[in-house]
Amino acid sequence: MSTTDAPLSSPYGTLPPASPVATRKPLSLPRLAELHARGEKITMLTAYDATFAAMADAAGVECLLVGDSLGMVCQGLPSTVGVSLDTLCYHTESVARGLRRVQGTAWIIGDLPFGSYQSSREQALESAVALLQAGAHMVKLEGGGWTTETVRFMVERGIPVCSHLGLTPQTVHALGGYRVQGRGDSAALLKEQALALEAAGASMLVLEMVPAALAGELTRALTRCATIGIGAGPDTAGQVLVMHDMLGINLGKNPKFVRNFMDGAGSVQAALQAYVRAVKDGSFPDPALHAW
């Protein structure tokens, strides 16, 4: 057994060996760009603690999003709006420590929570610095239009940025609920915003609950920025899910586009590996479940 295939030691016991799809080399922006350029799907899951972060990394998940979804998943809040920057930093530190203990390779993305970047570019920079010092490699912020200059400001100062368009949970009240975005006339605006964010330097773009055809069009139109879909069909450059959703252990009803990967899996680790395989081979997501 090679060192690559050997079980990983952790303070929580021995984790299973890495999935064959895992590269076991530290992820970086250039390496993610290489995956995107050759058309290999990028895998992403949320993670909020050391143990699940280490398990996802061992399964070959390339990107771990310390998302403000932790407000609903971990804190029992009704939405993401109540999550603080201090809370995001705490969970980012936990994820980073988990990866360090097992010599993990995943790319960590920290969410900028509601109220931590809206006031000014300087506020956004200060919040981003806090997340990077906690262990994130990249920060994510929601919205287009006014966020474009904020993205440019941070990228010019050496901070990798993931943008987020479509359904933006931090502004769910303004959107009128958890509804599909980008239908009809709004599709042109969403495309305009996506192109502007790429021009500003965003390296990734989460597309949440937008029509699959539009997500595919945006993926082809963006030359450097990798699209990561959630409820956006199969044609994005990668996929992300809330880990608790794909393990079937959330507190509510799963969105229809989520697959419960614990079905038929003998363990959590097997479910995580099945998710990676399904994203890589294109069998997830199912286009029939994304007919917005």
Image: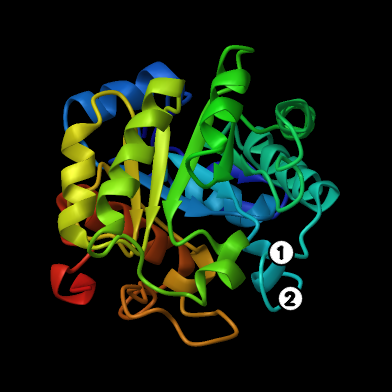
* Residue 81 tag number: 1
The amino acid pointed to by label 2 is: Leu
Q: Quadrant of the C terminus?
A: bottom left
In the drawing, does residue 86 fall left or right of residue 233?
Answer: right
Q: Amino acid at mark 1?
A: Val
What SS does tag 1 mark? loop
Return the residue nearer the eye: 249 or 257: 257
What residue is shown at x 70% (from left), y 28% (from top)?
Answer: 121
Q: Residue furthest front?
A: 185
Q: Do labels 2 and 1 touch, CB within 8 Å? A: yes
Secondary structure found at label 2: loop
Q: Is residue 171 above or below residue 153?
A: below
**Mark 2 crowd level (few <14, some 14–19, many ≥20, 10 Å Cα):** some
Q: Residue furthest right?
A: 86
- Residue drawn where x is 66% and y is 45% of the image: 10
User: What is the x, y in percent for residue 192?
Assistant: 32, 38
Residue at image coords 42%, 45%: 61
The answer to whether residue 150 is left or right of residue 185 is right
Q: Which mark is residue 77?
A: 2
Front residue of this view, candidates 42 and 16: 42
Q: Is residue 3 above or below residue 227?
A: above
- Mark 1 surroundings within 10 Å by alpha-carbon count, few (fewer than 14), some (14 through 19), many (20 or more): some
Q: Which mark is residue 280?
A: none
Dividing the picture into quarters, in which one does residue 112 lie?
top right
Up/down of 113 relative to 120, above or below: below
